[in-house]
Image: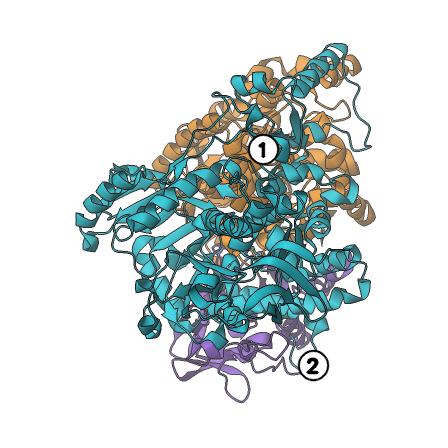
Amino acid sequence: MKYDVVVIGGGSSGCRAAKAEAAKGRSVCVVSAGLTLQATKPESEGSVYADLYELRKMGVAVLRGDTVLSGSWDGAKLLEVYTANGLTLQADEFILATGRFFSKGLVSTMDTVFEPVLGADVDFPQDREKWFNADFFAPQPFEQIGVRTTADGHIFIKGKAAQNVRAVGKILGGGRHAKK
Amino acid sequence: MQKNNESFLNFEACLKCSICNTVCPMMEVNALYPGPKKSGPDQERYRLKDPAFYDYALKYCLNCKRCELACPSGVQVADLIQRAKLQYGSRSKHPVRDAILASTDFVGTMASPFAPIVNSVLPLKPVKAVLDGAFGIDSRRTFPKYSSEKFVTWFKRHAQKEQEKYSKFVSYFHGCYCNYNYPQLGKDFVKVVNAAGYGVHLLEKERCCGVALIANGMEKQARKQALINIESFGKAVEKGETILTSSSSCTFMMRNEYQEILDLPTEGYRDSLFLACKWLYEKIESGEVKLKFKPLKMKLAYHIACHMQKLGWQNHTIELLKMIPGVELVVLNQKCCGIAGTFGFKKENYEYSQAIGANLFADIKEVAPDAVVTECETCKWQIEMGAGVPVMNPLSVIAAALE
Amino acid sequence: MKMKKYDVIIVGGGATGTCMARDCALRGLKTLLIEREDLCDGASGRNHGLLHSGARYAVNDPESARECIVENLILKQIASNCVEDTGGLFISLPEDGLDYQALLVQKCAEAGIDARIITPKKALSLAPAINPNIIGAVKVPDASVNPFLLSDVHALDAVRHGADIIKFKAVTSFLKDGDAVVGVKTDKEEYYASQVVIASGIWSAKLAEMAGAHIDMYPSKGALLVFGHRVTNLVINRCRKPSNADILVPEAVVSVFGTTSDKVPFEECDNMRVTREEVDFLLKEGVKMLPSLASTRIIRAYAGVRPLISVDSKSSSQADGRSASRGIVLLDHEERDGVPGLITITGGKLTTARLMAEKATDLVCKKLGIDAECTTAEIPLPGSYLKRRSFGAFLSGLGAKKEGTAASKTSFGTKRTSLGAQKTSSGAKKPCSTASLPVIEVEKTVSGIEKTVSGEKKSVSGAKKSCLAVRSVAQKLCFKETIPYAGIAALGRHGSETLKMDFTGEGAEIVCECEQVTSAEISYCVKEFGVRNLNDLRRHTRIGMGTCQGSHCIQRAAELLAIELSTPEKAEEFMKDYLQERWKGMTPVMWGETLREAEFMRSKYSALLAEGKMSAK
């Protein structure tokens, strides 16, 4: 299936990005893992479907309950991505909005942090003990961990900036959010 | 059983965020159901310690898989619950009834030769009262009608020879509903697939997919039937034929549950088994197939069945329906209809089943479509009864629109 | 009002102190136990939870081994709801060879420990998670014990026999009459006693100093990892000379792996943190025994400190805790330091707590000139119950009213009911009587869900009614009690005390889902044990000890506790304190799923955060 833009992740930042692109008249597909299309907002009948209504009304294709597993590149250009339900999505542009640790946009092991979908470069302290602050109520370093990006939000793959992949939302780390 | 006591079905990853509880349709209407989080990952840790911890209230789980879809941690909540039900036993008050409801092949084969009698007797009030009192089948529940001529019989008599004029083929898993209740669906399937330039073969041997058997605890029988199906799939794959289906629950059962619940190998055929609409859309999108539609002036409401949502192919069906000129398509918000297969027929579950579907019926009535479109036949029975609107399989819509 | 003059004051409410309070009370002594925090705040609440069979010590320390097996069998009888008789294995990895195994089995036989060699195949069928390459295995009667509950039931029994227990009060000084100790002083009160016993673990040294006596002790830190589910259902030991990181214990619904032994300064004892090195080391070693630990979620790390006594004052600077004495150390300060009226009981292990208490109480009685025999091994503790009753026990129970277990002295014991007699080097022990223990059954929910949606019960047919009537008579004859399904987890913890919990209405509401703690259990514990905060409540109920470490239940638990304690304004404080406490255990293992849990916890409780200005989301 081919679109102008594929948004990977249907949280608040992903939906916002999808709406912005659709408003420009582009064909958009949002891939959202959860049933709730806004995992961070409280669930009530209205807000679970609010984004879904709007997105559908704008003609955005929504794949709910699906996840992007990996992608294929041509140099610095991402050509297509593959989903868990067996779909191949091609697009000119991709937006990575998979969130941080809770939503598995970033995955941590005993000694490393990585971005599981596209393998984007991640900035994180090497010493595991520096990921947290002993005081629960203080800002935590792990809340600042995120993918490295260029000034306009393009991710890096092994040090090379990706041509057509931007990151928005919590995956950016450093307390940054999607550009308004 | 658990291999090496690793985190089976990922139950350890549960963060207790409780998102699964918020999407569970049973929890909303039934205070006795502990909910997916408790029934799945929570209690799994306890069941590992002592089977006595098994909670019989797990019988209320519909296996709609919404909890799994919503889970941000990838815990296979519904699978944990189904496996626990099979392992630790679900005590039923009506084991004979459950066996009858679940053995669709057997009942279908028995009923079909007597279809006219069966169809006129079943709805009679005294008969329903007996079924209700003695067997616990709720008297308010309407029954699907049986067909005098099974689909397979029709196919062998009227369609099989003509298929041989095609050079490329697909195999058709028709399922119980098509075979015993509504062979027209199979006829529509053949029409659509033929229009796409493919011939239809039946599988060498086909048995009921077993989704109802599993739900009623009849694991051995389900496994027996599954193995027969798997062997047939293998043979179809060897011939290079994609296996197509028309029912979402059957597809889901055979692609996913055979592996996740029954531990049977699916690698040999999983990548060749699809719902017909997914296959058809991909063929059209790639340009291999071109279909000509005539206008079909209908307001259609598309209902994404729970298992369809889990498969994730609803967009293919939606795009296909949008291709038909004249169709006004409304996509309903994904809500569970409440029947959950044989679940909604049982007296002790009937009211929960209806309560769960109430929201969906209200949505449908608001849209006021000419027909509801869905791949699931049990949803069809529930929606026809609950919303009073005819329900069609998308293949039937497409067949009606073909020139 | 508590009276101020006692026969004996025990300082320290860990396993030893509570066992001693019970022993003294049962022997008729006027007893006071005083503890500066909640029971089991020290090593008794930070250990492995292992009820040794003694096999671990059979080769190096046969006397300890003998003590262990005797106590092991006693506790399994008298504290059956605190102990889970899991059994244990000693597995030999290829690099361990089989020489030690042969020695182990021989020495176990000599010590009276039932150790049997089984094939690796059998071992793997018992515990599929162990390393498939093992070359040998020995089955031993190891078990898992909940030290909090063990102390709780001892404390309950002590109080029910007239002892006083004061918690949350530290001893600030000793009351002296010349050289003799005559009592203790807290910040506000003075308590007098003929004998004062220090049972404060590593803190005994400081207390003894305060009283004018000297003990050479040093703290040996042990770090442990808690894994999120029961990786095995047996205790797994490594069959080699006792070393670090070689035991896995299944405990409730988690697995605990450990441990280490490093000397640490005294100052660290009140604030232990597990380091990254310790975590890495434990995990590396653990994976050798159980490969699946590499991918099992670690929910928490914690550390406790062993009170080790230097055998002579020269060895107080030893770095490795394992060669100092771990045997039971009973110090008579009158003889040793010229300080009459003071005794210290320390060393030992959790498994031998009852024996330590017996020895110390024997000494106290001797000093007081009282001739009273120890009966703690014969009488079941509160909470003991049976799942079913043997026919012989049923017969001997007929006509005997259900009384509290305290009254069930040996008059009810017959050969058929006794579960076996133990012998120690000091003589024969009488059998533990179970005739008057209640038989408890859990109601299956199947009966509860026969109601219709409208809540009306279906009418029961005549035949069914008479069946139910016969059943209930039979139940009454067998003294069978039932508790609702909601109480099943509480039954596993508190045993027959669960009958006191009220599961009707909101009582059945589950507060902590990971550990299935209901609000009925919380109410009971608050009433019986006196708790100040959620951390105390945790000890008695396991609240917050599951995979989510409280991220789900903390708010509800704090509200409930605040209501129970009639201090509703404190709910937020309880919550904040407990969140901080749980965080301490999560941070050493904060990666993977635990890091996700941490992120979730932070975002959920962000409204409570002290500083408002940080990127909560």
Say which amino acid is labelled 2: Glu
- Residue A112: assigned label: none
User: Picture coordinates of residue C308 (x, y %)?
Assistant: 40, 64
Say which amino acid is labelled 1: Tyr
Q: Chain of mark 1?
A: C
Sequence-wise first label, 1 or 2? 1
Q: Which chain is cyan?
A: C
User: Picture coordinates of residue A119 (x, y %)?
Assistant: 42, 72
Residue under label 2, please give it. C611
Q: Which chain is purple?
A: A
Question: Looking at the image, is C383 positioned above or below residue C146?
Answer: above
User: Picture coordinates of residue B357 (x, y %)?
Assistant: 74, 41
- Residue C385: assigned label: 1
Q: Which chain is orange?
A: B
Q: Nearer the viewer, residue B268 or B172?
A: B268
Q: Residue at x 81, y 32 (%)?
A: C455
Left or right: where does residue B61 sit relative to residue C428?
A: right
